[in-house]
Image (cartoon, grey):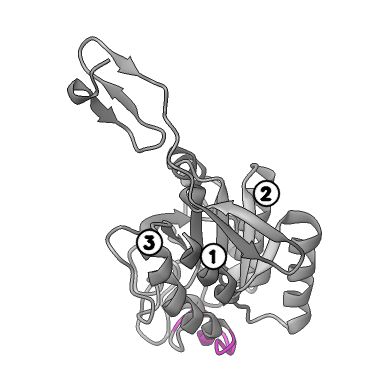
């Protein structure tokens, strides 16, 4: 089979190679890039070629003083603690060819796929500022796709090679293409970061675990505006049931082994 006459269809390592007579569906695996990650419970051997990083909800509505959380009286200072470690780690991940996936709330303006129960979480009285409503500071619609409110905070600069996935629940796997994207890219190990640690990060991590992904929470790149006991319980549950917990320094060390 003459490879020079074949053309790729799809994304490696899940691509076919074809011409008018041949379809090579062998899906040859990427060359392994093995590294060691030290976590709170075990030393992990990982394949960087099968690894992606999900950055969850580092958006203005959750992290900016003019965003939705701040508008309802929440101190967003704790959520912003994840920004500086991510500023350092994300360029290192890109340099190591580990995809960065921005997984953000990005609702339809008409909210047709959002139930009353989900809307209640963001507007329990029905008279406040909830999903799709204009923010008091600038009128941006709360967590609406394409709005300032749903945009990633300015301190975290995305790059053209990054991947964007809008989500509509606390879990990024529910009713989104995230699972299909990761499987097409051959990713089986997921690094997770972002806000809120005990809500959207945890829900996404749990669903990833249920779907068979290997999950590693990057603790210092994750944050929450909830009480500290919520973060403690989350870390305990990840270690106990759903994966592993490490920090950005350990990930950086692993990237430098490649």
How many residues crowd around disc 2 within 10 Å: few (fewer than 14), some, or many (20 or more)? Answer: some
SS assignment at label 1? helix
Q: Nearer the viewer, residue 113 or 25?
A: 25
How many residues crowd around disc 1 within 10 Å: few (fewer than 14), some, or many (20 or more)? Answer: some
Q: Can you say whether 7 is above or below 50 in the image?
A: above
How many residues crowd around disc 3 within 10 Å: few (fewer than 14), some, or many (20 or more)? Answer: some
C-alpha separation, residue under disc 2 versus residue under disc 3: 27 Å
Q: Position of residue 105 (x, y in %)?
A: 47, 62
Number of disc labels: 3
- Residue 66 painted magenta: no
- Which residue sits at x=49%, y=60%? 53
Label 2: which residue? 209
Which mark, by number, is residue 125? none
C-alpha separation, residue under disc 3 versus residue under disc 1: 35 Å
Q: Residue furthest top?
A: 21
SS assignment at label 2? helix
- Which residue sits at x=72%, y=76%? 231
- Which residue sits at x=31%, y=16%? 23
Label 1: which residue? 254
Label 3: which residue? 145
Give the label, 2 or 3, closer to the camera: 2
- Residue 71 painted magenta: yes
Residue range corresponding to the magenta coloring: 67-78
Which image quarter: residue 193?
bottom right
In this picture, residue 19 sits left or right of residue 133: left
SS assignment at label 3? loop
Q: Can you say whether 132 is above or below 8 in the image?
A: below
Q: Position of residue 55 (x, y in %)?
A: 49, 65
In this picture, residue 192 sits left or right of residue 64: right
Q: Is any atom of residue 127 visible in this view?
A: no
Q: Nearer the viewer, residue 31 or 118?
A: 31
Q: Position of residue 9 (x, y in %)?
A: 29, 29
């Amino acid at each position: 089979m003459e490879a020079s006459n074949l053309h790729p269809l799809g994304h490696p390592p899940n691509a076919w190679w074809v011409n008018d007579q041949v379809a090579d569906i062998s899906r040859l695996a990427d060359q392994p890039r093995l590294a060691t990650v030290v976590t709170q419970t075990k030393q992990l051997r990982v394949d960087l070629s099968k690894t992606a990083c999900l950055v969850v909800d580092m958006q203005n509505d959750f992290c900016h003083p003019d965003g939705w959380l701040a508008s309802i009286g929440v101190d967003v200072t704790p959520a912003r603690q994840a920004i500086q470690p991510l500023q350092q780690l994300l360029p290192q991940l890109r340099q190591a060819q580990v995809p960065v996936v921005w997984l953000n709330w990005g609702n339809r303006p008409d909210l047709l796929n959002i139930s009353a129960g989900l809307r209640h979480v963001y507007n329990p009285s029905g008279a406040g500022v909830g999903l799709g409503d204009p923010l008091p500071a600038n009128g941006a619609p709360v967590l609406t796709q394409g709005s300032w409110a749903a945009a990633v905070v300015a301190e975290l600069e995305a790059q053209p090679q990054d991947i964007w996935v809008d989500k509509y629940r606390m879990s990024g796997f529910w009713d989104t293409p995230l699972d299909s994207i990761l499987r097409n890219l051959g990713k089986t190990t997921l690094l997770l970061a972002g806000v809120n640690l005990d809500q959207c990060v945890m829900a996404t991590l749990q669903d990833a675990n249920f779907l068979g992904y290997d999950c590693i929470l990057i603790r210092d790149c994750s944050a929450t505006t909830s009480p500290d006991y919520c973060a403690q319980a989350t870390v305990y549950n990840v270690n106990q049931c759903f994966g592993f917990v490490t920090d950005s320094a350990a990930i950086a060390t692993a990237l430098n082994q490649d």
